[in-house]
Image: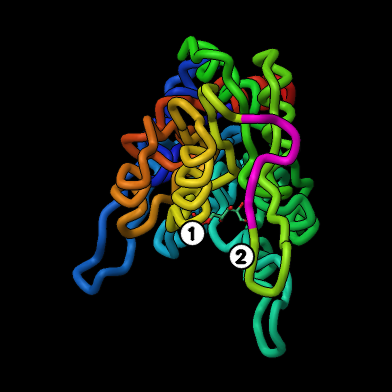
Amino acid sequence: MKIIGGPASQALASRVARELNLTPTVCDFTKFPDGELYTRILDEDVDEVTIIQSTTTDTDLMALLQLIDACEDSPVINVVIPYMGYARQDKKFKHGEPISARAVARTINADRVFTVNIHEASVLDYFNADAFDLNASQQIAYYIRSLGLSNPLIVSPDKGAIDLAERTAREIGVDYDYLEKVRHSGDSVTIKTKNVDVKDRDIVILDDMIATGGTMAESIKLLKSQGAKDVYLACVHPVLARNAVMRLFNAGVKDIIATDTIEKSQSCITVAPLIASTIKGLQ
Ligand code: R5P
């Protein structure tokens, strides 16, 4: 088995290879003078291959397509897309729109595809390959446990991430809840935790991703106003677009915790053991 890391997932692929006692295959990633990508795998052995590459940007997707194409002689091609861009456009929201997640999935020519906490599981059906979603809740739970928080509560910012919050909280052995919007009248809305009082508790708000930080900034302010102690944010995918990080610190976050599905300075949790154990299971 060869492990190939694309340019967006160099550290993660190296960690996966190390977990498997393998040396990752080195590739060249440069650009032609006109800006087009040049990719070359610097290894002539032909073997089953696992390519690991998040597709946060369009250029990342192109690099992944090039790597898959360059592996045409491999008997089996596994592709791990730890963070799949465009997964949120998983249906037509308005007439005339594409299903971008489907458009991306259709380009992936592989035997098996693995994602990590993909935004909607239904996206897996768009791949022309056996496709599986891995869940990073155990890795996130280990890290949160190591923080030694006081009477912590895991909170999902909406119903969408409640499964992730529940699984993570169960792993740690703590409570979980979610934020619910209650409309009292036409112009009066309150947002609060559904079941649990947050007063004097350390809170970890957990979502699959933080993009602009808008959802989280509102949630932090709300929980603070209800008497929460320290408020941490955790996510699988730290997209953290534009000024999200500063926005969140201005809103009063204690710290931002994320995995290395996207390699950022906030990526203190690695999903390498999750991916490595999955690859081991294939052999
Ligand atoms: C939405 O469905 C996702 O789970 C996240 O809540 C959302 O993408 C976060 O976006 P933002 O950080 O821009 O509020």
| 53 relative to 43 in the view: left or right | right
Specify the segment rendered in magenta: 190-197
The spot of residue 257 in percent (x, y) is 44, 31
Residue type pointed to by label 2 = Val
Quarter of the rendering occupied by the N terminus: top right
Residue positioned most to the bottom: 96
Task: Please name the residue shown 71% across and 43% down the image.
Answer: 112
Q: Evaluate whether residue 74 shows in this view.
A: yes
The spot of residue 229 in percent (x, y) is 46, 26
Please rate how many residues cluster around mark 2, counting C-alpha atoms within 10 Å: few if below 14, some from 14 to 19, many from 20.
Answer: some
Q: Earlier in the sequence, mark 1 or mark 2?
A: 1
Q: Nearer the viewer, residue 197 or 165?
A: 197
Q: Quadrant of residue 263?
A: top left
Residue type pointed to by label 1 = Leu
Q: Quadrant of residue 79?
A: top right
Q: Are marks 1 and 2 in contact (CB under 8 Å)?
A: yes
| 36 relative to 277 in the view: left or right | left
Q: Nearer the viewer, residue 146 or 9?
A: 146
